[in-house]
């Protein structure tokens, strides 16, 4: 009887331990802001409340297009959207919403229950350091040294250097495994044009739309790969890496909807000319309980 009870207790402890580990989030998503540790892969509400407790202002990214700049929409200590006074010091942008909240006119692209979590350091004086070792004042050489990261499209300015990586369930993705699909896509572009190739190979835009400028008007009309490549070179967009990332995110998005993975995240860093690094964390997951009213 004692042995059976001991076995039950040990099993309960193991389950509790595993649950605790699961709540800690993924290692790559750990970040220290102004000396306090967070994990962006944890529950959005949990992170937002913790940021508020440490006096970090959390501004809504999706509402940044509309707000009075002097009174931005922010998430308060209860993770509710309220008006606040603008601050020039410790803040970041964040949101947790479907694609249509990020991009006007994208309602038709929304996948049922697919929600995107974003954290974005942009023009903020907040001091941070990520699990990869990148800090708020790192430079372009530091980005180039990141293992598993590739040159990617900009977050803000095409003159800046941007590197990023895709993670699926916490593990970094090797983009080279999508090389064959990329080569096939190139041929299809030559035969049918850019937009037709995107519809044929990457039809579900919601899985990757926020990762680059690839759907900007300047690229849409290109009828051959060489024409598209030249256009990208002129606008300093690393076409091959962008497309490999799109293929990887599209693949992850399909697996996410099929229940084969729990989440995938794109992390990008952009080094400016003023010793500042913009950082964006984009995480895609399924949440059947998401409701906009929960944040009002």
Image: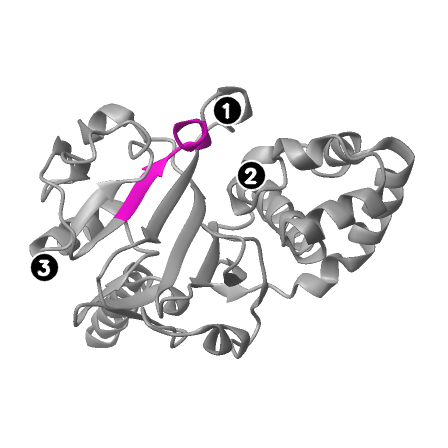
Asked whether the viewer can see residue 243, the reply is: no
Q: Name the residue tied to disc 2.
A: 209
Q: Name the residue tied to disc 3.
A: 54
- Snapshot quadrant of residue 293: top left
- Snapshot quadrant of residue 59: top left
Q: Name the residue tied to disc 1.
A: 106
Q: Is residue 202 left or right of residue 15?
A: right
Image point 77% across, 49% down: which residue? 230
Q: Does the segment drawn in magenta span residue 95?
A: yes
Q: Nearer the viewer, residue 55 or 171?
A: 55
Q: Is residue 86 above or below residue 21?
A: above
Q: Nearer the viewer, residue 206 or 152?
A: 152
Q: Is residue 277 left or right of residue 191?
A: left
Secondary structure at numbered mark 1? loop
The spot of residue 127 in percent (x, y) is: 23, 68
Q: Which residues are magenta?
A: 93-103
Q: Earlier in the sequence, mark 1 or mark 3?
A: 3
Asked whether the viewer can see residue 290, the reply is: yes
The spot of residue 223 in percent (x, y) is: 83, 34
- Snapshot quadrant of residue 123: bottom left
Q: Nearer the viewer, residue 233 or 166?
A: 233
Q: Earlier in the sequence, mark 2 or mark 3?
A: 3
């Amino acid at each position: 009887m004692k042995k059976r009870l001991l076995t039950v207790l040990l099993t309960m402890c193991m389950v509790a331990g595993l649950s605790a580990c699961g709540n800690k989030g993924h290692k790559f998503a750990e970040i220290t802001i102004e000396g306090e540790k967070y994990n962006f892969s944890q529950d959005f509400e949990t992170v937002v409340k913790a940021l508020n407790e440490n006096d970090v202002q959390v501004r809504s990214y999706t509402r940044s297009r509309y707000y009075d700049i002097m009174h931005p929409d922010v998430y308060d200590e209860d993770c509710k959207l309220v008006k606040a006074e603008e601050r020039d010091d410790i803040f970041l942008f964040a949101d947790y919403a479907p694609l249509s909240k990020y991009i006007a006119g994208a309602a038709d692209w929304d996948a049922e229950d697919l929600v995107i979590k974003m954290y974005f350091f942009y023009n903020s004086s907040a001091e941070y350091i990520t699990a990869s070792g990148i800090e708020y004042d790192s430079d372009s050489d530091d980005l180039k040294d990141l293992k598993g990261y590739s040159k990617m499209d900009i977050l803000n300015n095409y003159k800046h250097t941007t590197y990023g990586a895709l993670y699926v369930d916490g593990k970094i993705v090797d983009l080279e495994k999508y090389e064959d699909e990329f080569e096939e896509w190139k041929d299809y572009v030559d035969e049918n044009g850019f937009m037709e190739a995107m519809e044929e190979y990457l039809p579900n835009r919601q899985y990757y739309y926020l990762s680059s400028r690839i759907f900007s008007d300047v690229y849409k009309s290109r009828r051959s790969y060489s024409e598209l490549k030249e256009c990208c070179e002129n606008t300093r967009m690393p076409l091959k890496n962008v497309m490999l990332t799109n293929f990887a995110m599209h693949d992850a998005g399909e697996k996410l909807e099929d229940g084969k993975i729990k989440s995938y995240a794109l992390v990008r860093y952009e080094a400016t000319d003023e010793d500042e690094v913009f950082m964006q964390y984009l995480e895609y997951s399924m949440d059947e309980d998401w409701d906009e009213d929960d944040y009002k």
